[in-house]
């Protein structure tokens, strides 16, 4: 799916809000004002809502059902999306590893929430998600055993 949008420069708040929402969805930037997501019922609904929000803010937005021109282009988009998510999982793994000796259960809860946010935009899962969940659960068990 593609969302093509244009928002006025001023005020900047709607543009910032839109970009934050797009980031949470895990979009890949195709061009200026054009983002892509894999097509499913959830992403379609989310992009349609965002398009409505853009129009309500005085902009233009169109949701497109699209197909890459080649298998190589499709793989490249999937790889870009997967790389971003993998990097986020790696940051959680690193945070759980670094804080193992100086943390509390609040940190574990924060890391679990972060894993949930990452999982919501993990359209091409690999072993990194399982590894991140395992590291956070090990941290949790270590804290429970220490208390």
Image (cartoon, rainbow, N blue to C red):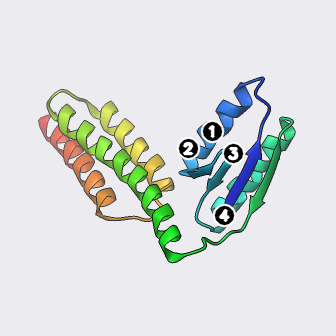
Q: Earlier in the sequence, mark 1 or mark 4?
A: 4
Residue beneath disc 3: 33
- Residue that lies at the very extreme toward the bottom in this rendered image: 71
- Badge 2: how crowded within 10 Å, few (<14), some, or many (20+)? few
Q: Which of marks 4 and 3 is nearer the N terminus?
A: 4
Q: At 33% from the left edge and 57% from the top edge, which residue is drawn?
A: 129
* Above or below for 65 versus 21: below
- Residue at mark 1 to residue at mark 2: CA–CA distance: 6 Å
State yes or no: discs 1 and 2 in contact (Cβ < 8 Å): yes
- Residue at mark 2 to residue at mark 4: CA–CA distance: 15 Å
Residue beneath disc 2: 23
- Badge 3: how crowded within 10 Å, few (<14), some, or many (20+)? few
Q: At 24% from the left edge and 40% from the top edge, which residue is drawn?
A: 94
Q: Which of 93 and 32 is in front in this view?
A: 32
Q: Earlier in the sequence, mark 3 or mark 1?
A: 1
Q: Nearer the viewer, mark 3 or mark 2?
A: 3
Q: In which quarter of the image is the C terminus?
A: top left
Q: Which of 48 and 131 is in front in this view?
A: 48
Q: At 83% from the left edge and 45% from the top edge, which residue is drawn?
A: 60
Residue beneath disc 1: 19
Residue beneath disc 4: 1
Pinpoint residue 25: horizontal percent, then vertical percent: 57, 50
Count of all numbered marks drawn on residues in the image: 4
Q: Is disc 2 placed on a helix, strand or loop?
A: helix
């Amino acid at each position: 799916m593609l969302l093509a949008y244009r928002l006025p420069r001023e005020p900047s708040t709607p543009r910032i809000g839109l970009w934050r929402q797009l980031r949470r969805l895990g979009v890949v930037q195709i061009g200026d004002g054009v983002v892509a997501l894999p097509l499913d019922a959830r992403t379609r609904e989310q992009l349609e809502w965002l398009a409505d929000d853009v129009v309500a803010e005085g902009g233009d937005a169109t949701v497109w059902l699209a197909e890459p021109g080649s298998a190589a282009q499709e793989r490249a988009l999937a790889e870009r999306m997967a790389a971003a998510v993998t990097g986020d999982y790696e940051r959680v793994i690193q945070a759980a590893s670094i804080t193992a000796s100086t943390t509390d259960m609040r940190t574990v809860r924060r890391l679990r929430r972060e894993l949930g946010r990452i999982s919501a935009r993990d359209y091409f899962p690999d072993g990194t998600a399982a590894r991140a969940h395992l590291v956070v659960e090990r941290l949790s068990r270590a804290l429970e055993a220490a208390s």
